[in-house]
Image (spheres, rainbow, N blue to C red):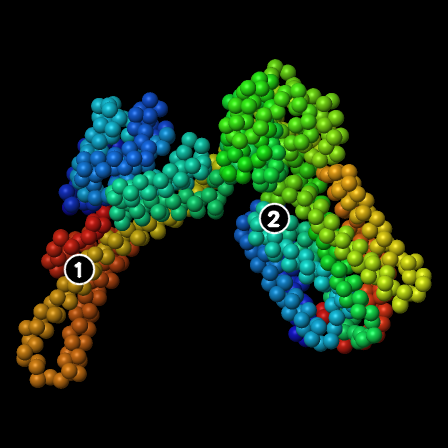
Amino acid sequence: MTAVNLAFLLTLLCYFVSSLLYHIHLFAGSDRARNAAPILAGAGVLLHTAAIGLWCMQGGSVLRDGGMPLSLVAYFLAIVQVVVSFNPRWASLGSLVMPLAFIAEFYGTWTTPGLSEHSTTASPLLRPHVTVLLLGFAAFTLAFCLAVFYLVESRLLKTKHLRGIFRRLPPLESVGTAAHWLAVIGFSMLTLGTITGAIVAPERWGPQWYLEPHFLVSMVAWVVYAAYLAVSLLLGWRGRRTTYFLIAGFVVVVVAYFASGNPTRNSPTGSAAATVAVGRPA
Amino acid sequence: MGAKSPFSHSPIPHPHSRGRSPKAVRIILAGLSHKTAPVQLREKLALYGQATRDALHGLRDATRMDECALLATCNRMEVYGFSREEDWQEQLLGFLAGQAGVLPGQLQDHLYWYEGGLTVRHLFRVAAGLDSMVVGEGQILGQVKEALQLSQDAGTSGTVVHRLFEEAIACGKRARTETEIGRGAVSVSLAAVQLARQILGRLKNHTVLLIGAGDTGETTAKMLLDDGAAPNLLVCNRTQERAEALAGRFGGSAVQYQQVHEALVRADIVITSTGAPHPIVRAETLKGVMRARRGRPLFLIDIAVPRDVEPEAGELEDVYLYNIDDLQEVVEKSKAERQAEAVRVESLIEEDLLKFQGWLRGLEVGPTIRQLQEFAEAIVRGEQERVGSRLSHLSERDREVVDTLVRGITQKLLRPTILHLKGAASSGNGYHEVESVRAIFGLSDGARGEAEVLD
């Protein structure tokens, strides 16, 4: 097992144990678990940093190799969770964020065939294009987690179950506000990514690039989030109904990611890549 | 000399029942609380600020205690001290009766007396909130801190009382952070405010509408503003003057009763507490309000009896309605949970008590060990001076060798005794062994140190 493989494997392990600890905190109210979970998640982030660093040093690219972009999304999620865990009221968010980070990391490393040789003639817009899309993906994932929390918490409030996990959830309105702003950030990234993608797409798919399945699904996601922003910003809608947009939007984003198998290879970013297997990260 | 351990765990039922050595020094407590005395008596002993400092000076003068502190709250008056006086109970009874302006006989049956470990345990329990009227309440911790501060200002606290109170404060904090003794609301108003915080987070920058300017409304408004995170407070009342008066007191603004609909649209959370005989917020009204709010959730906390908000309103989407029974249920569960947590707190207190005992025992044998070492050092120096002239032919190096030899022999001779004292302190018999060692080596009483003998 190479150092990079080991680093990815240990990252997975940290994310998994951290997920368990966040769940123990949420459902059993364990303060020890709440204290230990961010430490494990933080250790995972450090190992993940090392793994990504080693991957890049060996000539790989986290923006285009197999499922590596998804690993990068897991990396962003874990960092955010470690930061928010400094506030004890927000630590419980890890019970949803860290399992998603674990799944993303697991899928990302599992489906990466190996290091790739990359074209040096690719458009300079490719890297920012993918980066903003991945940041947007992470923002939508966090908005989705918060939307789920909002629905659970509002349900507990409506049914007057004010004990147990309710006490460990962040304030309802803060959850709604955070979800809203993450959706705004994600939408901005998605829009930017779509514009830059439209500029470089003809290189890969020619004049019919807009008929590519994953582009079409991405546009559906864009429309869902645009609808959300329209009702929330223009009409002033808030509350439970608007959170359904965030959940639906996330589902479409995930579908868009997987719409064409390995989107990064099929996307303009991966268009010029000739994949050469030199080792698997996990 | 009395043969009791410094931590005998027997309460002292009566101030005329013991025969102790006049030299025995012990941590003592005399006090009364809401559990033993009616408010008519407690209020006579109420002390604040400068009056407490004056009382501390009077207490020290009247009782000749080495150290003392007063814990005076609306629910208790307790005197903590470190005294070597045999008749400390009579002295304290006289002092407290004088303070209250009653005869000692009228006070005696309401007082409790502790000494040694029982005193320490009692203060730890008080600081942890176990002895409070509302178990786990947090105000007492601040009052214990204030008692320490006042005794320091008055110059009546010393090493032991200072450490005792500091450990009590640490124990109280530990109880609240490591257990759930302080969690949950224990009054309906507090439950309403905690629910508001759970929903809105920091109340600052949020708008709270208070419908009803009665006593309950006022209590709730006060609690809303208590933690410094003051929300924008709107007060609506059928009598406009009362609304303006309450809003003015808490820095809010009054809303005319006819404009309650607009205020309901604007508010983040609504707390109702009017004395109206019928609901004043109808479900039908709220339908219109919710349309205007465009799905923005509305939290209604109705603590009025009869209820101010129609129960059907709670079935509307994005409306969260809590009435006094819902909040009372929260309160009852919180109280039950606190009682259950009390068992965990008691075990924490026992741990902290053991640590404090260890520290005290160190104080008990420490001065004697130091005095023993000084005694040996004095002998060595005296002998060196006596034979110094006969060793003048020795070189500097040879004199150092002789010096090392003599000190080595002395230390080895003392070592078993010191180890024995330390071992005795750990097992709680330090006091007896200190007496034996002092007698054997002929150590004087003058340099014992104030905390050497504890009972």
Q: Residue at x 20, y 55 (%)?
A: B433
Image quadrant where one finds the C terminus of chain B: top left
Q: Which residue is mark 1?
A: B371
Viewer-nearest of discs 2 and 1: 2
Q: Amino acid at mark 1?
A: Gln
User: In the image shown, does A55 or B222 lie closer to the viewer?
Assistant: B222
Residue B452 placed where, x, y %? Answer: 21, 51
Q: Kindly report the distance in space between the C-alpha atoms of the residues bearing marks 2 and 1.
A: 57 Å
Residue A60 showing in the rendered view: yes
Q: Which residue is mark 2?
A: A90
User: In the image shown, does A3 or B287 lie closer to the viewer?
Assistant: B287
Name the quadrant containing residue A7: bottom right
Identify whether B103 is placed above or below A82.
above
Query: In screen coordinates, is B248 left or right of A121?
Result: left
Q: Residue at x 17, y 83 (%)?
A: B397
Q: Chain of mark 1?
A: B
Q: Chain of mark 2?
A: A
Q: 10 Å neighbourhood of mark 2: few (<14), some, or many (≥20)?
A: some
Marks 2 and 1 share the same chain: no
Count how many numbered circles sit on residues in the image.
2
Residue B176 placed where, x, y %? Answer: 46, 43
Q: Residue at x 26, y 32 (%)?
A: B13
User: Residue most toward the right?
Assistant: A208
Residue A103 placed where, x, y %? Answer: 72, 58
Residue B336 showing in the rendered view: no
Q: Amino acid at mark 2?
A: Trp
